[in-house]
Image (tube, helix red, strand yellow):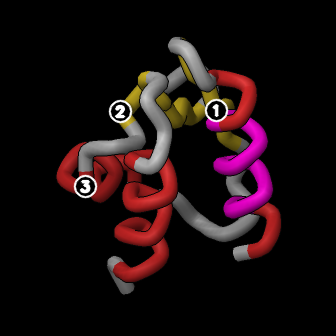
Amino acid sequence: DARPIAMLVQKASQFESNVYIEILDQKKINAKSIMGMMTLQLREGEEVLVKADGADEEEALEGIENYLKSN
């Protein structure tokens, strides 16, 4: 189901900052790219690292973290 990925991309796109999702020691993908995020093939319970860089990076990190925890 691509819907959770699409929702994550929408959430990341709300922020001015660059937002990245990284599978530890594997891939780092722009969280605003639906095609990129689809290539991650995230599985439930998988650990990821969220990185943000920009004017609202703290808000972006908090927003993405809250989204991931609630879904």
In the rendered structure, the answer to whether residue 46 lies left or right of residue 5 reads: right
Q: Position of residue 65 (x, y in %)?
A: 75, 48
Element carrying mark 2: strand
The image quadrant of residue 51 is: top right
Q: To which residue does mark 1 refer?
A: 50
43 vs 3: above or below = above
* Marking on residue 34: 3
Element carrying mark 1: strand
Q: Quadrant of the N terminus?
A: bottom left
16 vs 65: above or below = above
Q: Quadrant of the C terminus?
A: bottom right
Q: Looking at the image, is mark 2 or mark 1 earlier in the sequence?
A: 2
The image quadrant of residue 9 is: bottom left
What amino acid is at disc 3? Ile
Write the start and end of the magenta stretch as one range: 60-68
Rendered residue at 63%/22% (across/down): 57
Q: Is residue 58 visible?
A: yes
Q: CA distance from mark 3 to mark 1?
A: 16 Å
Residue lying farthest to the top in this orientation: 54
What amino acid is at disc 2? Asn
Q: What secondary structure is the stretch in magenta mostly built from? A: helix
Nearest the eye: 36 or 31: 31
Q: Position of residue 67 (x, y in %)?
A: 69, 62
Magenta region includes residue 46: no
Q: To which residue does mark 2 refer?
A: 30
Q: Looking at the image, is mark 3 or mark 1 earlier in the sequence?
A: 3
What amino acid is at disc 1? Val
Residue lying farthest to the left in this orientation: 35
In the rendered structure, the answer to whether residue 33 lies left or right of residue 53 reads: left
